[in-house]
Image (cartoon, helix red, strand yellow):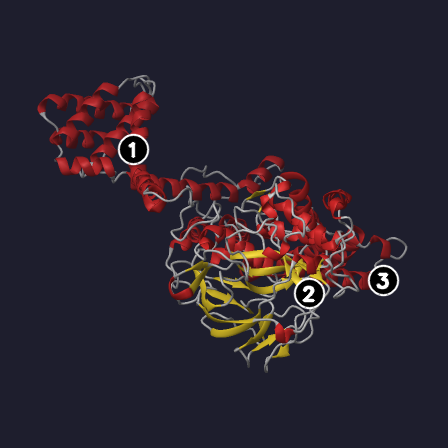
Amino acid sequence: MTGHARISLAAWGATVLGSLVLTPVFSGPFLFISALLCAVITGVGVLLQNLRTPRAVVPLVQFVVLVELLSIFFLKDTLKFGLIPWKATALEFNQQMVNAMDSINRFSAPLPPDSHLTLFAVSVISATGLLIHIIAVQLRQAAWAGLLLLIMYTVPAATVHGGLPALLFIPPAVGYILLLSAEGRSRLSRWGRRISGVSHLDAAEPVEASALGQAGRRIGLSVVALAALLPALLPALPEGVIGNGLAGAGPGSGFGTSISSTDPMLDMAKNLKQGDNVVALTYRGGPSGGTYLRLTALDLFDGNTWRISPREDGHKINGDLTPPPGYIGDLSKVPETKMEIDVTRNFRSQFVPVPYPLHSISLKRDWRYDAGALDIVSAGGQVIAGKKYSATSYDLQPTPDQLSSAVFTGQPDQYTSAVPQRTPTEIKTLTDKIIAGANGNKFEAAVLLQQWFRSGGGFTYSTENARGSGMKAISDFLLENKSGYCEQFATGMALMARIAGIPSRVGIGFLPGQSGKDGQYTVRMHDMHAWPELYFQGTGWVRFEPTPAARVATTPNWTVAPSPDPTNPSTAPSTAPSSPGATGDPGDISRRNLDPNLPADSGIPTLNSGNWWTKGGGRAVGIGAGVILLISIPWMIRSLTRRRRFAREPGRASAEGLWAEIRDTSRDLGLDWSDVSTPRQTGEWLVSQLPAETKPDALRLARGIEALRYAGDANPTVDLTSEAAAVRKALWSRAPRRRRWRARLLPPSWRWYLNRGSTEASDLLDEFDLLLARLRSLVLPRRHAN
């Protein structure tokens, strides 16, 4: 095989292996199509080079072939005569790329398998493959192709929430090593025959692995292994050793969280499932019993994700904010409450946690507010971490009668009433069935929906649901598994409210937190919450609470229908203060916020009121067992190896294994075993270390090994088990007690197994390096010199 063909195949393999890192981002058959297109481009390049085509022409022809293939696969309707890409093809390709970028900005990974997203992924991978081929084959600079593989890895690693799995680093790294190996072989092949550096390979091979190549592969193997293991160790390092760009410098043992304007719902879910339950903020004042603190409202649902609708530039904060949207009463008669809020450095958010509806806030210069959502967001990308501010809010307490008598005179905006076209008919039918008893009253329909989620629908609260809040996830949540957390409950009710003709959006923020001394409330990261807000003319946006009592014990007292069902306690007012204006013991808030699926302050799942096991004992036992297991690994390996050696049937392999066991025992006991001595010399050395009664066994063992290795007429079925057992027992009994314990717990011979493992792994790379040469020698006849 020619050098350029070998590098071309390696470039194709590196591209395919590198593209594996995109599997957490894209879905569908993009990987298969990309591998096929790159294979065709590679084949065209190899063919043209074999035909002695000018070097500058090869990439041009490959580019034309790539455009043709992309057009046939994805843009066939725009081709002229069904074959030639034309102006319409370019325009359609550009539109598909615009659609893909829009979807990437709006959706979270994994992206849906839409055609424009598949085209985007295939185009990126194929173009990268073409560039790698040009750099490695045409320019003969394979090392620089690693930058393209690095970009292909770092982009999803930096954008996918939670990061990429550590093992996904290995495929592009292996592909890069293979590419460098192929180029190195091509360079060295011009120097003539190379000296073999692989001891177990036949020297008669047409191509051997050089010592230089062997060393390079061992270094590459070590680097890949280190890179694969290092990410697994990083989470255990203290915060600040490397830094994640999110955590602050305030108190708390864990990482902070970040709430961005791109996808607040996904950020909330990530924090609830993975984040530490550190303090996010504290506050004083506000309604009796605490209050919900809202960050923002998601009002646009396109069937894939809930997000913030397009907004104009926010309003400057110069005094009082605009009145609450939809409220038509006299605000001067509405009581107001003032709060002092102190956000810790653990909580890094572009949105400010404030009560709704907000009247005024002390933040001014770098902050803006939206008139429709009444949320506060940074003007220049700064975060609220470490800020202290005061906020005044209206203490609106609508009555059920007011909400029930609300008359809809128009939609509040163009987003909050839209029901996606892809909404399953089953959800619409289910909604109609649930609200049938409302007799057309919107408020009673909302109460029935809330009641169905909390008690009548058979739902269970669990943070194990990882499918998000797209249409497919909502459909599965409502119709199939009925298990989820606040994200699914809030978005499910918001969608069904829209189907029922009630404008709705999803609020994201915090539960009231836990009350403490001097009227201070402490809000932690796991108090993050999502809830639906429904619009009623005259009152405006009203919060409902469909999340079951496992997470939120009670519903707002204004969501009780005028004539509630006395047999259903889920809609009855409770003494626990779940909302502003509710009455009861503030201490009940801690019980209301109890989530059996989330870690408590100690980081251990809350199983009951608390005991030694739940307060850290279980973790201590687990860590102790893990440490003991880790320490026991060398002992277990030595014990299993020794048992296997003594259990073999008599023969050459058994004798060599027993001789190796005496060698390892000597090393474990700190004796000076020599690797360069002959069996006879080693036997004489053993005799000097053993008591008189065991010396004959040592001599018979050494002479038996010598005969098997060097005597042609030796008995191949000789049994040296008893001699080896006697020698090992004698060596063990004569060693000091301290050395015996060290030999049990941490046998020095175990290091030899580590070296042996790395040698065998790198030798496997040498075998792979010679695979193509061996295949060629089988297929093509060897050339003999005349």
Q: Residues within 10 Å of mark 3 (few under 14, many from 20)?
A: some
Q: Can see residue 19?
A: no
Q: Which mark is residue 540?
A: 2
Q: Give the quadrant of residue 336.
A: bottom right
Q: To which residue does mark 3 refer? A: 88
**Residue 404, percent across and down?**
71, 56
**Residue 285, percent across and down?**
47, 68
Q: Nearer the viewer, mark 2 or mark 3?
A: 2
Which residue type does callout 2 highlight? Gly
Count of numbered badges drawn on the protein = 3
Q: In the figure, is residue 765 to the left or right of 19?
A: left
Q: Which mark is residue 638?
A: 1
Considering the image in quadrants, where does the C terminus appear? top right
Q: CA distance from mark 2 to mark 3?
A: 48 Å
Q: Residues within 10 Å of mark 2 (few under 14, many from 20)?
A: some
Q: Nearer the viewer, mark 1 or mark 2?
A: 2
Location of residue 443 with respect to 391 vertically, above or below: above
Q: Secondary structure at mark 2?
A: strand
Q: Give the quadrant of residue 326.
A: bottom right
Q: Can see residue 645?
A: yes
Question: Along the polypeptide, which appears first: circle 1 or circle 3?
Answer: 3
Which residue type does callout 1 highlight? Arg
Which residue type does callout 3 highlight? Ala
Q: Give the quadrant of residue 100.
A: bottom right
Location of residue 225 with respect to 393 vertically, above or below: above
Q: CA distance from mark 1 to mark 2?
A: 74 Å
Q: In the figure, is residue 536 to the left or right of 202?
A: right
